Amino acid sequence: MTSQRARDRLARRLQELGIRDPRVLEVMRSTPRHLFVDEALAHRAYENTALPIGFGQTISQPYIVARMTEALLEDGVPELVLEVGTGSGYQAAVLAQLVGRVVSLERVRPLQRRAREVLSSMRLHNVSLRHTDGTQGWPEHAPYDGILLTAAPRQLPEALLLQLKVGGRLLAPVGGENETQSLVRITRTSKAFVKDELGPVSFVPLLPGEVP
């Protein structure tokens, strides 16, 4: 189940579900998702489902990774992207193959360390990882062409919106853990933040603070 045949089957499934961008489909096809899950779950790596990675976190469903990535790239390829919630590192790996540079933040240090090892083994050297409270973003590198959240806040943190470049796009699930969540895309214009709702989703909550 970790073979190229399994990856090809996943890419076909994503296409059936509505993913159209050939760049995204090719990266989803070629990225070794089994490296980002525990060895005991490797046989399920190319199923279109979320899987546990420890610390109450999950590696997102491949369709959601592809959908968010496609929505981020829809109006042009961003040069600098901030990811809030590194988790397994899978979403960062997908982004790194499509954009100029990724800055990824993770509050749980053991997850960040493991993600660093996997990304390094893949020789994805355009990803910078930070152990920090992602709700505050990373202002040192702002403004960002794109921001992507892999966990759901009840409301989008103002600090993240303000780190978005004019013309930039932010993708995030929004809503409480036991509420209906919505995937939203925020585009910053010179005068406002414009919101598009892209459909219902289910994510773990975005939490503040750091876990050593």
Image (cartoon, rainbow, N blue to C red):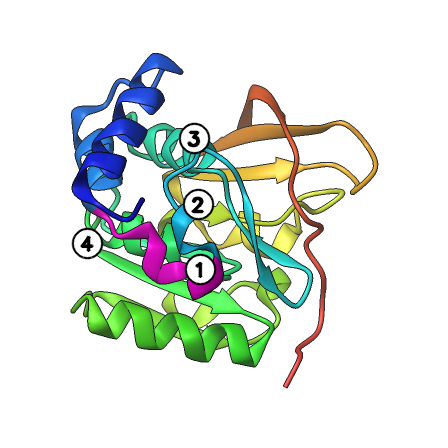
Cα–Cα gap, marks 1 and 4: 25 Å
Dominant secondary structure of the residues highlighted in magenta in the image = helix
The residue tagged 4 is 100
Where is residue 11? Give x, y as percent. Answer: 27, 28
The residue tagged 2 is 44
Cα–Cα gap, marks 3 and 4: 22 Å
Where is residue 186? Give x, y as percent. Answer: 51, 32
- Between residue 70 and residue 32, name the one nearer to us: 32
Task: Reply yes or no: does residue 36 show up in magenta.
Answer: yes
Graded by Cα atoms within 10 Å as few (under 14), some (14 to 19) or many (20 or more), the crowding at tag 3 reads: many
Q: Quadrant of the C terminus?
A: bottom right
Asked if 23 appears above or below 160 in the picture, the reply is above
Closer to the observer: label 1 or label 2? Answer: 2
Dividing the picture into quarters, in which one does residue 101 lie?
bottom left
Q: Quadrant of the N terminus?
A: top left
Residue 210 shows up from this direction: yes
Cα–Cα gap, marks 1 and 2: 9 Å
Residue 193 shows up from this direction: no
Asked if 136 appears above or below 68 in the picture, the reply is below
Question: What numbered label is drawn on residue 63?
Answer: 3
Graded by Cα atoms within 10 Å as few (under 14), some (14 to 19) or many (20 or more), the crowding at tag 2 reads: some
The residue tagged 1 is 37
Q: Residue at x 27, y 28 (%)?
A: 9
Q: What kind of residue is marked 1?
A: Val
Point out the tag, 3 or 1, that comes first from the N-terminus: 1
